[in-house]
Image (cartoon, rainbow, N blue to C red):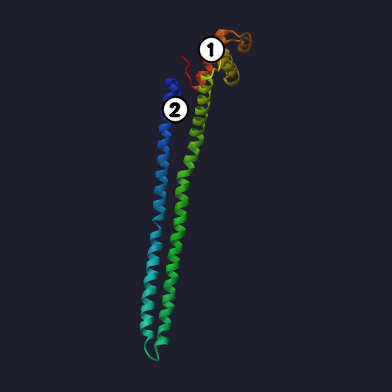
Amino acid sequence: MKLYSDFAPRRTRQIVADVVAVALIAASVAMGILVFSVVNELARFGRQMQDAGAGLQSSMTDVGGRLGGIPLIGESIRDPFDAASSAGETLQSAGQTEQDLILRAATALGIGVAAVPILILLLVWLLPRIRFVTRATRTRQMIRVGLDIDLLALRALTNQKVGAVARIDPDPLGAWRRRDPEVMRELANLELRSIGIRVP
């Protein structure tokens, strides 16, 4: 697999772009984790509510149980404490619900903050890199098994910009048909340079 160009200026640009891309991905992940942590910190109010509800429920249940044991009047005294215990359970449930909602929101925001720049970066950086690696690797393999100058020159005629091809010869297609060795070599070199391969 060929990851980088054989030509120093382009290879340097590719390496710098790779380092910057990896740094931006790491920064995006760190920012997503930070956003998650900050938003999830709001769940402490839900935890406090849940703890308060649990404490209220436990206290009222204990008091109601003790007072309920008093003969003759225990049951009537116990009713308000049972109601307060039920309110504590409701408060506890509300605190848990708030924590769940905040956790879901924190997760969504954290992933969103990290994923959006990473997706943009992958489109702008990774797709061209994959295209380069695929094209360079395939061409190098073809050269090893005998890709000749004729086909490389033809690929230059179809792949390269018209201005670049015209600088080699005013009639590059005619020169290719005549099999002009100098023009064909220059066209082949133009194609190889654009792919990032130097042939000795």
Amino acid type of the residue that numbered disc 1 sits on in the rendered structure: Glu
Which element carries disc 1, helix, strand or loop? helix
Q: Which residue is at a point 52% across and 19% down the rendered structure image?
A: 143
Q: Position of residue 170 (x, y in %)?
A: 60, 10
Q: Which residue is at a point 59% across and 17% down the rendered structure image?
A: 151
Left-right relation of 43 to 185: left
Q: Are marks 1 and 2 in contact (CB under 8 Å)?
A: no
Q: Position of residue 110 (x, y in %)?
A: 44, 49
User: Outermost residue toward the bottom?
Assistant: 72
Q: CA distance from mark 1 to mark 2?
A: 25 Å
Q: Is residue 68 depicted above or below 95 in this figure? A: below
Q: Position of residue 65 (x, y in %)?
A: 38, 81
How dense is the environment of label 2, judged by Cα within 10 Å: few (below 14), some, or many (20 and up)? some
Q: Mark 1 or 2 closer to N-term?
A: 2
Q: Which residue is at a point 47% across and 44% down the rendered structure image?
A: 115
Give residue 157's mark. none
Closest to the observer: 57 or 196? 196
Residue with the mark numbered 1: 186
Which image quadrant for residue 103?
Answer: bottom left
User: Outermost residue toward the front?
Assistant: 145
Which element carries disc 2, helix, strand or loop? helix
How many numbered marks are there? 2
Q: Is residue 179 depicted above or below 23 in this figure? A: above
Q: Is residue 45 depicted above or below 84 in this figure? A: above
Amino acid type of the residue that numbered disc 2 sits on in the rendered structure: Gln
How dense is the environment of label 1, judged by Cα within 10 Å: few (below 14), some, or many (20 and up)? some
Q: Is residue 77 depicted above or below 38 in this figure? A: below
Q: Position of residue 112 (x, y in %)?
A: 48, 47
Give residue 14's mark. 2
Closest to the observer: 147 or 72? 147
